[in-house]
Each structure stands twice: as C-alpha cells, then as structure tokens.
Image (cartoon, grey):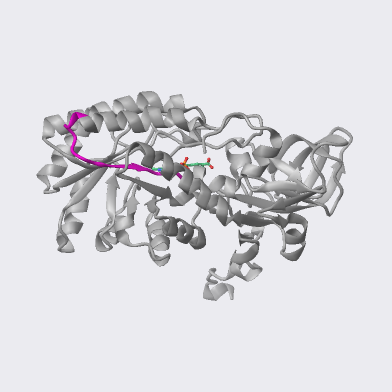
Amino acid sequence: MVYSIMDYNNWLNYKGLEYREGILYFANLNTLELAKRFRTPIYVINEQIVRRKYKELKEILNSVYKKNRIYFAVKSNTNISILKILLSEGSNFDCSSTGEIYTCLKSGISPDRIIYTGNMFTNEDFEFAVEKDILINLDNYSQLKRLLKIHKRKGKDTNLISFRFNPEFGSGHHPHTITAGKEIKFGILENQIIKAYSMAKEFGFRKFGIHQHIGSGIIDANDFKKPTEKFLNIIEKIAKDLGIQFEFVDFGGGIGIPYQPNVNPIDLTKYSKILLHSFKETVEKGDIGNPFLLIEPGRYITAEASIILTQINTIKDNGYKLFAGIDAGFNTLIRPTMYGSYHHIIACNKKNKENIVKYDIVGPICESGDVLGKERELPVLEEEEYLAILDTGAYGYTMSSSYNSRPRPAELLINDGIVYKIRNEETFDDLISDQIIPEHLK
Ligand code: LLP
C-alpha cells in the first residue's frame, strides 16, 4: 500500500494499534493484560505486520521488474522467529557479520539465500563464509588476495563475487547512518571500482554482482535519485570496459518509516520510479546482462511491527520539570540516546487527548542521557501505569545491552490472537555466568 498523510488513528492502526474504550490494543490484544501477565519492559512483535510489510515491498518490486529478490537486513532484527516468518514469505537475507550468518543458518535458511555484506573482513570471516558457500560482497579490492588464498586452501571454486560501490551521495536520518561519501569507510569509490572488478577477473572469478547502500532511515525518496543514476552509470561502464555481465544488482536498504505521526511516509511510487524503473531501463539497453534486482530492507519490514511495553515507576516533579520514570532505558532501546531518534510513546490505559501534560520520559540507567522521549505531551500519568514505545522492531532488541547490569528483556510474538514467548528475559546469572575468576581471586 502506498499512502499519503494519515490521521492519527490510521497512523496507529497501520502499526496494529488501536484504543478500545480507552485501553490500548496491539494485534487485537489488550496491552494492559499483556504487560501485567509478562514482566516489563518487554518487546512485543506482531507477526502479521512483518508479513504485510514484506508483501507490500515484494508487490512493488514484482509490478516493475519480476526478476527480483528481497534480502532482509538481519542486523535490524535477529530473532529466529522473525527470520523464519520472512523465510516463509520467500525472503533472502543480508548479513553484516559471521554471527548473523550463523543465526540464519541455525534458522534453517540455506546458504544460497544469504549475502554477506561485511566490512573490514577478517580471515576468520572469509573462512566461515567460503566454507559454507556464502556469497561475499567485498568492501575493498585489497581483500581479494586473502579471499583467494582461503578459496585455494579449502579447495573451493572461485565463482560469484560482488563489490560494494560507494556512490558518494549518501542519506540517512542521522550522520551515523549515512553510508556513502568520500569520508565514509564503506564501499569502493568510482576511481577504484574498475580496478576491483578487473582484479577479480584476473583472480578467476567468473560471475559478478554489484552493491550499494547509501544509508538508513531515508524518508525522502528523492535522496535515492543521484546515487541511483551514478550507480547505473558505473554499472554500464564496468560492463563495457571489462565485458562483464552482472548476475545481480543490489540497491541496499534504507527505506525509512514515519516514526512521528505528522511525518509523511516515504513515497514508494517515487522510490519505484527513481530506482526500479531506471534500473529496468538500463537492463533493457542490453549491455549489463540480465541481472536480478536486489534490495536489502531492514527497518521498513520490522520497525513498525513491534512495541515495547514499559511500566511507570516514578513520577517526579522537581520543581522545574516533570519526569515519568519507566523501567525501559537506553539499555532496552538506544536509538533516542544514540541518534536523538524519536519514538512515539503512548499510554496503555488512556488516549493521548485529555489533561495533557508534558513529561520527559526517562529510564533507570545512571546517565542523564537516558531519555526515551523529551517533553512529550501525554495525559496525566500515575506511578504503576503502563506506556507503549512504538516502532521498536528494527535496531531495538539488536542494539540493546545489559549496561548497569540490567538483564535484557523478553520478546513476545503475537499471531492470530495467540501470544508466543520467543525469547526469555536474561537472568542475573546470565549476566555473570561467562566470567572466569582467576585462582588467586577465588
Ligand atoms: N544493507 C546494508 C549493507 C546496511 O548496512 C543496512 C543498514 C541495511 C541494508 C538495512 O538498512 P535499513 O533498510 O534498515 O535502513 N542502527 C541504525 C541503523 C543502522 C543501519 C546500518 N545498516 C538505526 O537504529 O537507525
């Protein structure tokens, strides 16, 4: 579905949320009952939204260019149940580390559905990927030599290889999530990309892909225009100069979501025009082969599928400011502290409309930066009530920590009204069980 401005209720409904007689429901379940039944803070994921978001993108791709594949960006959500849901929809998987590949393989995902877009690869990374026959997307031509040695040592054929191109036009919701530009560590710039592919040819690779990812959290589709043009030009140049026909062209991820009710969602019709249609036109010229079109969305698929339920423990009026202290902190969700990201926060037992007061919503971590929402307009809140933090399905649990020795929370999955616990909360024992005490301190 491609939508324009929505009213607040529609905005909530799209994310599986609605108020029924003043009580917040998520995936048709009463959030107050969920919060009381399970310990807070807790991540709650709606299976149907994950499926719907995947299908939305797949339909758009299919409508323009049938030979396409979605590679879900595993770094946004590594829960095995989420990976299995996406596998059942037909997804492939983009991994940024050996650990993510390991998780995918353990989830029953076959190696031929995985692309390894790492950076600063170690020999151990290569060993693992080559051993398991995982497609590697290199980040520099210098890595070829080491990779080749490992291929030889393992007696594996050099077949398909890909490089990440850095188009120098990046975009993202925060400087840390912009991944193209001369100052940025990712990918290979225009002046070295031909060298990379000719080296790969010399080294015996016979099939080629190419990749770019310009950044994350992009809400203006126009930001894809310049990098896409440059990408397609460079692909044509490589094809012509080196006589290479591409097996796939990977446009990366980056599609943002509206974290704020007054923000328009990305215009996917425009995205499709800028990226998919121009790609199709380039292919139709006939010079670059008959490649698969790949994209690697993470946030778009999982962010809106999850909320965090959290309990208010302290309402503090310090004479200057009102604080609502909750049991989720930047250990639970780091995006607000790390990027100043906005996550909408709503009360589970009353609509955000009457007796509005401004609160800073703060966590229990011993740092002043532990603020999940600044100056949020909410109905008058009481200690022991519950709040929901929205859009936490991407880069939420995966970036959580046990800082301040606070165990990570559990995760719930809801499907057709049934609640499944898909991850246990950590225990205090989990926090210390990996430590080894030297003899002299025993
Ligand atoms: N492909 C590659 C090579 C990537 O590096 C990323 C994200 C993606 C795909 C998926 O991007 P997405 O569709 O989710 O925007 N922690 C940050 C986001 C960092 C993203 C890193 N790379 C955040 O919480 O906003």
Question: Residue 180: x percent and y percent?
Answer: 38, 31
Between 366 and 430, which is closer to the camera in this rendering?
430
Q: Residue at x 79, y 39 (%)?
A: 352
- Quadrant hosting residue 426: bottom right
> Looking at the picture, how far across and down is residue 432, in whole percent?
59, 68
Could you tell me which residue is drawn at 32 percent across and 50 percent down?
A: 121
Residue 206 in sight: yes
- Residue situated in front as seen by the camera: 326 or 142: 326
Q: Is residue 288 magenta?
A: yes
Q: 290 or 323, which is in the foreground?
A: 290
Nearest the eye: 441 or 64: 64
**Relative to 75, 424 lies left or right:** right
Prevailing secondary structure of the magenta residues:
loop
Residue 343 lies in the magenta-colored region: no
Quadrant, the C terminus? bottom right
**Image coordinates for residue 124, horizontal then vertical, percent:** 30, 58
| Residue 175 placement, left or right of 180 | right
The residue that appears at 25% across and 44% down in the rendered structure is: 162
Q: Position of residue 79 (x, y in %)?
A: 51, 59
Q: Which residues are magenta?
A: 285-298
